[in-house]
Image: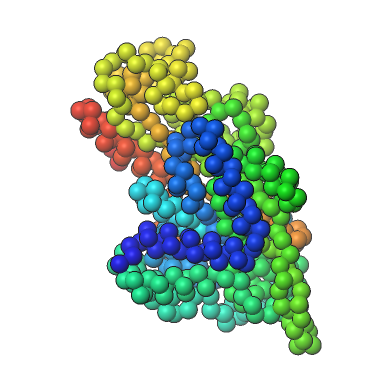
Amino acid sequence: MAVTWELRAAFARRLSAMYGVEVPAYTTLVEVVREINAEVVARGGDTGRLGGIERVTAERHGAIRVGTPRELRQAAQVFAALGMRPVGFYDLREAAVSAVPVVSTAFRPVDADELERNPFRVFTSLLTTADRRFFGADLERRLEAFLARRVLFPPELLELARRAERDGGLEEGPAERFLSLAVAAFELSPEPVDRAWYAELERVSSVAADIGGVSRTHVNHLTPRVLDIDELYRRMTGRGVAMIDRIQGPPRWAGPPVLLRQTSFRALAEKRLFREADGRVGAGSLRVRFGEVEARGIALTRAGRALYDELIGEPAAVWERRFPATERGLARAGLGFFRYAPGTARGTGTTRGTGTTGGTGAGAAGTAGRTADEREAGHGNGAGHHDPDALLDDGRLIARPLVYEDFLPLSAAGIFQSNLTGAGTRATGAGGTPYDRAWLSETLERPVHDPFALYEAEQRDSLCRARAALGLPPDPKDSP
Ligand code: OOG
Ligand code: NI
């Protein structure tokens, strides 16, 4: 029996092999990433704090784009077989300056142990065909008719996926069949593209054409995780690879890595067959698939995220003024998420500020300049020296950061935009189709998880366990 996580790991491996054959530049990217990650580890970088090198080396996220709620529901079924749940709702229509008529979610594992085994995730976008800012009534009707005729996921694949979800895995034979059908569903279709139809959609948005102008879906990109994205950007450029203008997300700054930084090489021209108006089929090319790479940092709380949103686009110097410079500072200010565990020091006072939160020089900076009164003022529930802050200070608790497992709408929009062939068109005003998280949940017939709630639960559970291990009473603040 191949259990859920084994199916997920095998799927990620096979998808990577398939995509490497389709897009040789991806293989180059993976090689450079591997080189850099090995160098960072050799330099003695404390990489383990944000996931061991094994996890990081295997880590990928894919991106796919689908056309209808039905296709999205089927994709969700395939991913459910792999233990990947919809997390987060991203409205790229609002985030992008160019015409990007999609809303998205990410399918990913949600439990800590599942993430540890294999964190494979797929950013999945749905074309918003009913949004009048992009699609007039006539175009919407023709688009819907086109999409209704195509089959992305064959019935046999969906049936195996249902079984895998129900049973928590598949026997060897069915697992093999499931994996090969699943990978095939994301291969580039050899079927000729209708030139006129594709061009009509491209005038609206090249994303719309990539989704609704072809008969199948395909992996748009498969993103490895790198430990030094600035070096990656330099090295790819040095190899003569055209990169997008910048790294999306937080700047490189002196503090601990937070959230997500991403960049990509520009979409490459790929050979496709086209059907012309007179029925002739001939060769041509499309430029839609690109090579993305990412560096992951610490998950931020709602407050941390609000600060991030405020500082988007600000240079490192501003970050260094506004964000705490250490993990310990992020924890104290309630800006970052952490997993707590009992520390080695069980006494009080003696190990204060010895850097038990580790990482980039945390700890010592921790208690400095802050009086006991100030610390008390921070919780005000009478827990006194039993609150996490005090427990960290005296070494009874240690904290490791939670890795940010999700995406950023503005970065996603930036990545989409940097790889579009044209800005497309969007009418102002009349938009208003209520594609939102509730709508998405209903459409999927599955809950769409709130990423903040997942990190919060993880942090709270770890704190409860740690307090119990230390023989401390549960903190009323931490009960669900
Ligand atoms: C998705 C673009 C966004 C990310 O990592 O933020 C994305 C797409 O191009 O389909 O993948
Ligand atoms: Ni991506």
Q: Position of residue 406 (x, y in %)?
A: 50, 48
Viewer-proximal residue among 238 and 469? 238
Q: How is the image coloured?
A: rainbow
The answer to whether one can see residue 283 in this image is yes
- State whether residue 413 is above or below residue 323: below
In-image side of 450 versus 427 (left or right): left
The residue at the point 55 percent across, 69 percent down is: 186
Q: In the rendered view of the protein, which quadrant contains the C terminus?
A: top left
As drawn, the residue found furthest toward the bottom would be 279
The residue at the point 40 percent across, 33 percent down is: 400
As drawn, the residue found furthest toward the right would be 278
In the rendered picture of this protein, how many numbered marks are placed on residues? 0
Viewer-proximal residue among 155 and 186? 186
Q: Quadrant of residue 51?
A: top left
The residue at the point 46 percent across, 64 percent down is: 11
Q: Position of residue 304 (x, y in %)?
A: 51, 34
- State whether residue 139 is above or below residue 44: below
In-image side of 52 versus 320 (left or right): left
Q: In the rendered view of the protein, which quadrant contains the N terminus?
A: bottom left
Q: Position of residue 293 (x, y in %)?
A: 60, 49
The answer to whether one can see residue 132 in this image is no
Viewer-proximal residue among 286 and 413? 286
- State whether residue 67 is above or below residue 246: below
Q: Position of residue 312 (x, y in %)?
A: 63, 37
